[in-house]
Each structure stands twice: as C-alpha cells, then as structure tokens.
Amino acid sequence: MDEKGKVMPLSGEAIRLMNYIDDVSVTLRRILSLIPTLNEEERARVSDHLKAAHPSATEVLAALEAR
C-alpha cells in the first residue's frame, strides 16, 4: 500500500512468484494424497528427504518477511 492506503499494482515478477507458490501448493497436495499409499519405511525416508530440502518454505518466508 502507498501512503494514502491505496493498493499498489503488482510487478510482473511478484505475480510470477505468486504463480510459483501456487505450483508448490499443487505439488504439496499431490504429496499429501499419496502419503496413505506409503509404508512406514517409505514415509520415514520421504520425511527425511523433505526435512533436508533447502531452501525450505520457512526459509523463504523468513526472507520475505525480512526488512
């Protein structure tokens, strides 16, 4: 927002980043839908793989919120 409280238009880059976030959300929904098909060992290995993924969503959020 600007100093008068009006919403400023987004740049093409911001819109592109929001589209990437939508793509990530779709991927996470696919992952969630497949989790019930995994056995315990597979769940553990996929969980470890997700924990090791960098950058994480938390890291990206922290970068966005940094001032």
Image: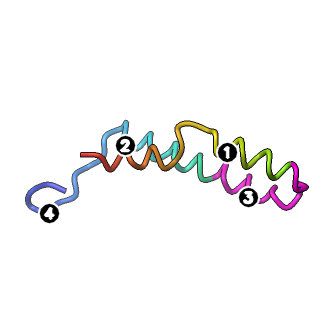
Question: Which circle, 2 or 4, is nearer the viewer?
Answer: 2
The amino acid sitting under disc 3 is Leu
Q: Nearer the viewer, residue 54 or 5?
A: 54
Q: CA distance from mark 3 to mark 4?
A: 39 Å
The amino acid sitting under disc 4 is Gly
- Looking at marks 4 and 1 on the same chain, the residue that comes earlier in the sequence is marked by 4
Taken as a whole, is the magenta stretch helix, strand or loop?
Answer: helix
Q: Is residue 32 magenta?
A: yes
Q: Which residue is mark 4?
A: 5
Crowding around mark 4 (Cα neighbors within 10 Å: few <14, some 14 to 19, many 20+) is few
Quarter of the image with the C terminus in it: top left
Q: CA distance from mark 1 to mark 3?
A: 13 Å
Question: Which circle, 4 or 1, is nearer the viewer?
Answer: 1
Q: Nearer the viewer, residue 34 or 67?
A: 67
Question: Where does the image place residue 52, in percent across and percent down from the top left?
Answer: 64, 39
Q: Are marks 2 and 1 in contact (CB under 8 Å)?
A: no
Q: Which residue is mark 1?
A: 50
Q: CA distance from mark 2 to mark 4?
A: 24 Å
- Mark number displayed over residue 17: none
Residue at position x 80%, y 50% in the image: 44
* Boundaries of the magenta span: 26-41
Q: Assign a secondary structure to mark 1.
A: helix
Q: Which residue is mark 2?
A: 63
- Looking at marks 1 and 3 on the same chain, the residue that comes earlier in the sequence is marked by 3
Q: Assign a secondary structure to mark 3.
A: helix
